[in-house]
Image (cartoon, rainbow, N blue to C red):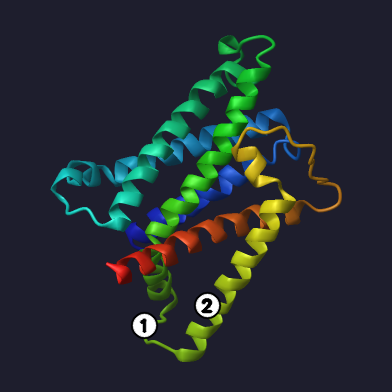
Amino acid sequence: MNLFRIRLLLDFLAVALVIACLAYWWLDNLSHELFGTALLALVIVHNVFNRRWYGGVAKRRMDAARIVNLVTIVGLAIGMAVMLVTSFLVSRDLFPFTALSGAFAVREIHMFAGYWVLLIIAVHLGTRWGVVMNTVSSFLGLTSRNAARIIGLRAAVIGTALWGVKSSFEMAFGAKLMLTYSLDMWDFNESTFGFFINYASIVGLYAAATHYGLIMVRRAC
C-alpha cells in the first residue's frame, strides 16, 4: 500500500471519527474526548502530508474546484479551531483543569462546530472525488472502463444521495447547522447502525452534490 492510499485511508477514518463524536449519547464522555483527540491528531497528520499544497496556493490558476477547495480548507480550519478551543473549555476527563463550570453555551457552540465540520469535510471530499475514485479503482485493480460498473456506481450514488436527503430531515441536520434547538434524539437502543448510516449518507449527499455541481460549472464555462 503506497503512501497516498494510507493518507486516503486516514482521511476516511477522520470522517468516521467525526460521525462517532456526534454520537455523544452512544459513547461515554471519556470515549468522546478520546475520539476527538484522535481526530485532532489525524487533522495534524493530514496537514503535514499536504504541507506543500499551502506553499503553492498563490502560484496555481484558480478554477471553480480550487476556489471551492480553498474555501472549504479555510472553513475547516476555523471549524476545527472552534472545536479545539471549546473542547478544552468543556472537557471533563482528559483536561478537567481547563474546563469552565456551567459552560452550557460553550457546549452548544462545540456541537454546532462539529456539524459544520462534517458538512465542510463532505464538500471538501466532493472537490477531490475524482482523485478518490481513481485511487480506489487502482487499489481494486479496476483499470478498464466498464459500462455495467459505471451504471452500478451511478445508481449507488443516486441511492446514497436520496438516502442523504431523507437522513437530513430525519436527523434535523439543517436545524443543527443553524444552531436551532431541535427535539430529535436518536434512540441508540433501537438502532446504532442506523445513526452512522444516516450521517454517512449525508456526507455522501453533499460530496456528490459538490462533485457534480463542479462538473456542471466546468461545462458551462
| Residue at disc 2, secondary structure | helix
Q: Position of residue 71 (x, y in %)?
A: 35, 44
Evaluate whether residue 126 shows in this view.
yes
| 32 relative position to 3: left or right | right
User: Quadrant location of residue 65?
Assistant: bottom left
Residues 33 and 148: in front is 148
The residue pinned by badge 2 equals 154
Look at 54% across and 33% down and name the residue there.
113
| 195 relative position to 120: left or right | right
Q: Position of residue 108 (x, y in %)?
A: 64, 26
Q: Residues within 10 Å of mark 1 (few under 14, many from 20)?
A: few
Q: Earlier in the sequence, mark 2 or mark 1?
A: 1
Q: Residues within 10 Å of mark 2 (few under 14, many from 20)?
A: few
Look at 83% across and 45% down and name the residue there.
187
- Is residue 19 placed above or below 79 in the rendered structure? below
Specify the amino acid type for callout 2: Arg
* Quadrant in which the N terminus appears: bottom left
Evaluate whether residue 46 shows in this view.
no
Q: Position of residue 70 (x, y in %)?
A: 31, 46
Q: Nearer the viewer, mark 2 or mark 1?
A: 2
The residue pinned by badge 1 equals 143
| Residue at disc 1, secondary structure | loop
| 75 relative position to 106: left or right | left
Task: Report, in whole angstroms, how far the alpha carbon at label 2 lies from the one at label 1.
Answer: 17 Å
Q: Outermost residue toward the front?
A: 220
| 83 relative position to 20: left or right | left
Give the total of numbered labels.
Answer: 2
Residues 125 and 205: in front is 205
Specify the amino acid type for callout 1: Thr
